[in-house]
Image (cartoon, helix red, strand yellow):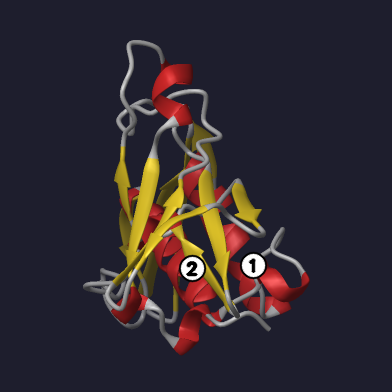
């Protein structure tokens, strides 16, 4: 096992099978977090009623795909690649903020629109500091911002735009996987 330039290199041969793993330091963090979440059967940091099966699946999917990006080599008795999972919903794995009693701006049979609460200090989703997600409690459901459509508010400054930002959810997206426990 070697650690060089932010990457772990593990390789050995056992019973004529070559085992190797080259993974970055961040990849090890993702792997460790995945393992701990699997052992606990829940996402660390999401407590009590704020746990939903949809959040678990989405955060685990995000951690897994992020970990895959950090692996440059893998080999074992099964093969030389890990399972690629397609079409999962990516939920930000860290820094989630749940809003109880969000301000409903409009509601009809198809959509519900809330005042969007932005906790990133920016409304630029391409910015590195944009990693905080807001979940909205609606009836017995915890709706993650990733399934909603955010409309930025008007104004020249972030503060002005945040005051009038909205998020709209299709009611057809409100499924049992988002049900509060």
The residue at the far left in this view is 86
Rendered image quadrant of residue 158: top left
- What's the residue at 31%, 54% (across, down)? 73
Residue in the foreground of this view, choosing between 122 and 116: 116
Q: Are marks 2 and 1 in contact (CB under 8 Å)?
A: yes
Q: Is residue 52 above or below residue 154?
A: below
Image location (x, y in percent) of residue 104: 49, 57
Q: Is residue 148 above or below residue 162?
A: below
Q: Which mark is residue 43?
A: 1
- What's the residue at 41%, 32% (across, down)? 164
What is the crowding at mark 1: few (fewer than 14 residues within 10 Å), some, or many (at least 20)? many
Image location (x, y in percent) of residue 138: 55, 70
Quadrant of the snapshot with the C terminus: bottom right
Q: Which mark is residue 60?
A: 2
Image location (x, y in percent) of residue 38: 62, 76
Horizontal placement of 39 versus 80: left or right? right
- What's the residue at 42%, 63% (across, down)? 64
């Amino acid at each position: 096992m070697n650690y060089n330039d932010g990457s772990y290199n593990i390789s050995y041969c056992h019973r004529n099978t070559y085992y190797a793993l080259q993974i970055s330091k961040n990849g090890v963090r993702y792997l460790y977090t995945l393992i701990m979440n699997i052992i606990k059967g829940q996402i660390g940091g999401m407590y009590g009623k704020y746990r939903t099966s949809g959040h678990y699946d989405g955060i685990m999917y995000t951690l897994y795909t992020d970990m895959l990006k950090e692996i440059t080599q893998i080999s074992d008795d099964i093969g030389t690649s890990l399972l690629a999972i397609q079409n999962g919903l990516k939920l930000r794995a860290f820094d989630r903020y749940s809003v109880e009693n969000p301000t409903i701006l409009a509601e009809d049979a198809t959509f519900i629109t809330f005042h969007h609460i932005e906790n990133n200090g920016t409304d630029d989703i391409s910015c590195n500091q944009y990693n905080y997600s807001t979940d909205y409690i609606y009836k017995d459901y915890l709706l993650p911002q990733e399934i909603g459509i955010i409309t930025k508010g008007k104004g020249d400054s972030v503060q002005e735009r945040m005051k009038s930002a909205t998020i709209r959810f299709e009611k057809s997206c409100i499924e049992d996987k988002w049900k509060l426990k």
